Amino acid sequence: MFDPKLIRNDFPILSRQVHGKPLVYLDNAATTQKPHHVIEALRRYYEESNANVHRGIHTLAEEATALYEQAREQVAHFIHAPSARSIVFTRGSTEAINLVAQAWGRWALKPGDEILLTEMEHHANLVPWQLIAQATGATLQFVGLTADGTLDLAHAQALLSERTKLFAVTHISNVLGTINPVADLIRQAHAVGALVLVDGAQSVPHLPVDVQELDCDFLVFSGHKMLGPTGIGVLYGRPELLEAMPPFQGGGEMISNVWLDHATWNEIPWKFEAGTPHIAGAVGLGAAMEYLSALDMAAVRAHEQSLVAYALSAFERLNHDIMIYGPKDPALRGGVIAFNYQNIHPHDVGQFLDGEGVAIRAGHHCAKPLMRRLGVVATARASFYLYNTTQDADRLIAALQKTKETFSVVAHR
Ligand code: PLP
């Protein structure tokens, strides 16, 4: 039985106070809190098994290597990858996308080729493609949005052509919360011979993702957004693509043999892991996946969907003072709700809410082109996760009501 009240007990930080009030943490799209299980795995790793991986012949090095490679197996299992060979550890989603842009892009793209993106991408799934387009002569195309913040699917279909070499698309928007129909988009892209990279930064932590069922070519996500440590992330790639792609960075670990003037490459996935990796990070991510699997990702999704439905209807208590971005139907959105409140600047809203113990985010959310498309410079954003409750949503609404009262008093002085 999925019980967020019991789950909260696993997260020590959630029992702290902020400005004398119990913390309500609603900034989960930025990063998530860590359960005892993850903190304990990190502590145990450093206290008992810390060593560098792959190169040592002593017991600690063997233990560290086994733990690191076991984490890779756990990741493969979590996203139902056919083998751990297809799992590359990176620093996060951003580095994973840069890896594909640089390694695959430099090798595969030429002038006249097109990279298809959407108007709702995070800068992490935009700027790496701008850089590689400039370097290769490929051009960028963008799928537009409908009025309710979903992808314009007819536009996507119209833009896909034999010139499209890659479609890089977010699974869930970190601003609009929109869940994109990636399985259909992948089918359509494959029909014209394009590869598909799915930005799973906001989806893998929140709902079941099966790379074989989706049939994506690349999937990226970040450990810190799914209860794991910062500085560790994942690139899933089809093994045959990873085999064919040249390396991303050079250095130790990614080589098979080295001469003064040239080198040969290690097997995948290590070909893409130059230098000492974030071993403890991988171990912590493995523990986070154990924790999430025990809860069941379908239950995590169901909880968030009902919480967002509750929050969206609770927002109605604020009458017409609030502008909410993205689809109205909770079935079409993840746990992210971006909004603007009266004419109060989102930074002021965020600061006032902090005073009430409620942590939200305010700003452009690394999606400046989307902000322009929405006609705003910034929004406030509340984002929910498995440990949030309807009481958290109520605290948010109550704090917003108080914000309005305070600001209208100030405005009338
Ligand atoms: N893609 C999306 C949709 C995101 O929301 C984020 C982070 O907010 C990223 C990519 C980048 O993730 P990271 O900063 O962990 O590399």
Image: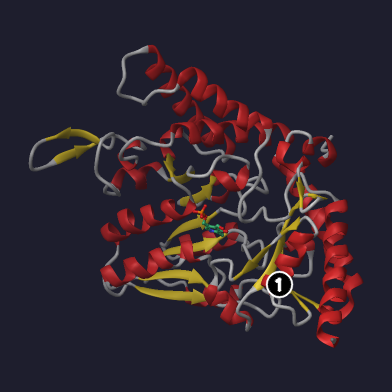
User: Cβ(mark 1) to ligand 1 < 8 Å?
Assistant: no
Q: Residue furthest left?
A: 261
Give coordinates of residue 79: x percent, y percent: 57, 41
Q: Is residue 181 above or below residue 52?
A: below
- The residue at the far top in this view is 59
Task: Residue type at mark 1: give it.
Answer: Asp
Identify the residue at the far bottom of this view: 412
- Residue 19 vs residue 45: left or right? right
Q: Is residue 349 above or below residue 372?
A: above
Residue closer to the observer: 75 or 39: 39
Q: Is residue 164 visible?
A: no
Residue 324 at what x, y percent from top left?
Answer: 75, 73
Q: Nearer the viewer, residue 116 or 231?
A: 231
Q: In terms of depth relative to the viewer, which is nearer, 196 or 36?
A: 36
**Residue 55 in the image: above or below residue 198:** above
Residue 319 placement, left or right of 279: right
For residue 239, say whether it is visible: yes
Q: Residue furthest front?
A: 413
Quarter holding the N terminus is top right
As rendered, which of 34 and 338 lies closer to the eye? 34
Where, by quadrant of the figure, is residue 240 drawn?
Answer: top left
Q: Is residue 224 above or below residue 371?
A: above
Q: Residue at x 46, y 34 (%)?
A: 83
Quarter the C terminus occupies: bottom right
Query: What residue do we see at 65% from left, 78% from top?
Result: 146
Q: Position of residue 88 (x, y in %)?
A: 42, 41
Mark 1 falls on what kind of element? Answer: helix
**Mark 1 neighbour density, 10 Å: few (under 14) some (14–19) many (20 or more):** some
Figure colour scheme: secondary structure
- Residue corresponding to mark 1: 348
**Residue 256 image offset from top left, x and y in percent:** 21, 32
